[in-house]
Image (cartoon, rainbow, N blue to C red):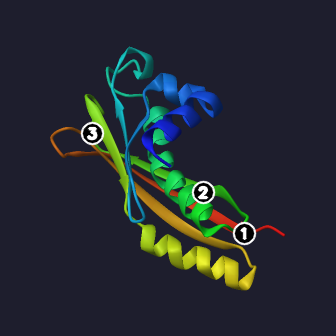
Amino acid sequence: MNKTQFHLYLFTKIPISWLAGVRLKQLNDDICITKVKFGWLNQNPFKSMFWAVQGMAAEFSTGFLCAEKIRKSGKKISMLVVKNEAEFTKKAVGRITFSCNQGKELDAILQKAIETGAGQTLTMFSEGKDEKGDVVSKFAFTWSFKTKN
């Protein structure tokens, strides 16, 4: 999936994320990086980015890595978030990037799901950093994977 496909997908399937400014920065076999810029549409009353907007960008950095790996496998595998945790350490202002670099771990879990036919889970982490490189939030999404018949 390239940036144009990602943005078209967001615009047509999850328009609130498009309006909030979530964008794809990088996607390859090892890492997915999303970005979102603080602005009027995604603010909270405390003059920083609303936590849910950060959550969308963070989830996409894990979920699109999963979706792309599943697409490339050629197998029918369902995926679902079964748990989410978040920690906020600094006001999110400016451009925030969220990165997940667990491509190799994901490969192993998907292979196990394909080989065994049993559901598998993987907790994937996304860290949000501001333009200075300071961590503003950390997210953990536990994804469940199961092959379909």
Residue ID at (43%, 59%): 125
**Within 10 angstroms of label 3, few (less than 14), some, or many (20 or more) residues?**
few
**On the image, numbered disc 1 is attached to which residue?**
146
**On the image, numbered disc 3 is attached to which residue?**
90
Provide the secondary structure element on which disc 2 rests: strand
Mark 1 vs mark 2: in front: 1
Residue ID at (48%, 55%): 62
Kind of residue sitting beneath label 1: Lys
Kind of residue sitting beneath label 3: Lys
Pointer 1 and pointer 2: residues touching (CB < 8 Å)?
no
* Nearer to the camera, 9 or 104: 9
Residue ID at (73%, 64%): 76
Kind of residue sitting beneath label 2: Lys
Where does the image place residue 78, in percent across and percent down from the top left? 71, 61
**On the image, numbered disc 2 is attached to which residue?**
83
- Report whether 102 appears left or right of 108: left
Provide the secondary structure element on which disc 1 rests: strand
Provide the secondary structure element on which disc 3 rests: loop
Residue 101's label in the rendered image is: none
Separation of marks 2 and 3 at Cα, in angstroms: 23 Å
Where does the image place residue 8, in percent across and percent down from the top left? 55, 32
Pointer 2 and pointer 3: residues touching (CB < 8 Å)?
no
Residue ID at (49%, 34%): 7
* Farthest left residue in view: 132
Where does the image place residue 54, in percent across and percent down from the top left? 42, 38
